[in-house]
Amino acid sequence: MNKIKEFIKAEDGIGVVEIILILVILIGLVILFRTTIVKIVTDILNAITTDTNTFK
């Protein structure tokens, strides 16, 4: 009976739940701002490509 009480009071699983909640929030933000993120990454890659072409 004491083992069951100790298991219920154990807080080892709290870290896993927190990590899952943080991941869910990050994934939600990525989905919410997907078009903005794609535009920013595309602009950065285009700028890198343009700059590297000037060195050729």
Image: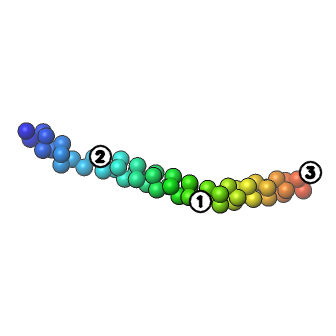
Q: Nearer the viewer, mark 3 or mark 1?
A: 1
Q: Which residue is mark 3?
A: 56
Tell me which amino acid carries mark 2. Gly
Q: Which mark is residue 33?
A: 1
For marks 3 and 2 on the same chain, the one whose residue lies earlier in the sequence: 2
For marks 3 and 1 on the same chain, the one whose residue lies earlier in the sequence: 1
For marks 1 and 2 on the same chain, the one whose residue lies earlier in the sequence: 2
Q: Is residue 4 above or below residue 51?
A: above
Q: Nearer the viewer, mark 1 or mark 2?
A: 1
Q: Which mark is residue 16?
A: none
Give the left or right position of residue 34, taking residue 52 as reference: left
Give the left or right position of residue 54, taking residue 33 as reference: right
Give the left or right position of residue 25, taking residue 14 as reference: right
Q: Is residue 40 above or below residue 13?
A: below
Residue at the location (85% across, 56% down)?
50
Q: Secondary structure at mark 1?
A: loop
Q: Secondary structure at mark 3?
A: loop
Residue at the location (13% across, 40% down)?
4
Q: Which residue is mark 2?
A: 13
Q: How many marks?
A: 3
Residue at the location (25% across, 49% down)?
11
Q: Secondary structure at mark 2?
A: loop
